[in-house]
Image: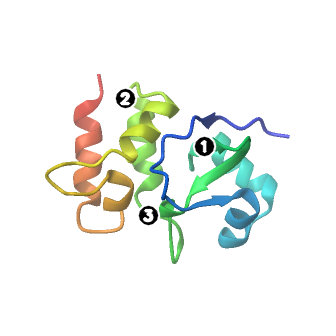
Amino acid sequence: MVSLPLTDDVLPADEPVLDLSDVSRRLGVSIGRTRTLIADHHLLAISRGGEPMVPEVFFDDEGIAKHLTGLVDVLLDGGFSRYEAMAWLFTTQDDLGEYPARALHGHSAREMIRRAQALAF
């Protein structure tokens, strides 16, 4: 079984999350495949109550949000830890009035990737 790289729960308290069974159903894949997606950083997950949870905002009607995997790659390749990447994804950008994970679903997606690239060391 794949060991899951989970981060501490840095999400806003009211941020909806999905357990691995819900993620698997949403994506139409096995729980094992879901665990692999997390291990390979195609998804990030937190530990909430000792259980792995994935923020619901990481998904859209098609599956994993279009720009999420690329944005996570940019953050991790730029030197962010999984924890730092998750924290950044859920930190409100004052000029946009929303946090990057939400901005991925709108016209600001590419701007979020650009900002992540600028943060790389």
Residue under pointer 3: 66
Relative to the observer, which residue lies in front, 3 or 94? Answer: 94
- Find the distance from the CA under tag 2 to the CA under tag 3: 20 Å
Task: Tell me which numbered mark, 1 or 3, is placed earlier along the sequence.
Answer: 1
> Mark 2 Cα within 10 Å, few/some/many (few <14, many 20+)?
some
Residue 3 spot, x, y in % from top left: 77, 35
Residue under pointer 2: 78
Instruction: Give the residue at x 80% y 62%.
Output: 30
Residue under pointer 1: 46
Question: Which quarter shows the N terminus?
Answer: top right
Residue 48 spot, x, y in % from top left: 65, 45
Q: What kind of element bears circle 1?
A: strand
Instruction: Give the residue at x 56% y 45%.
Output: 44
Horizontal arrangement in the rendering, residue 3 relative to residue 44 (left or right): right
Instruction: For marks 1 and 3, give the one nearer the viewer.
Output: 1
Count the labels in the image: 3
- Find the distance from the CA under tag 2 to the CA under tag 1: 21 Å
Q: Image quadrant of residue 96?
A: bottom left
Instruction: Give the residue at x 76% y 63%.
Output: 21
Question: Which quarter shows the C terminus?
Answer: top left
Q: Which mark is residue 92?
A: none
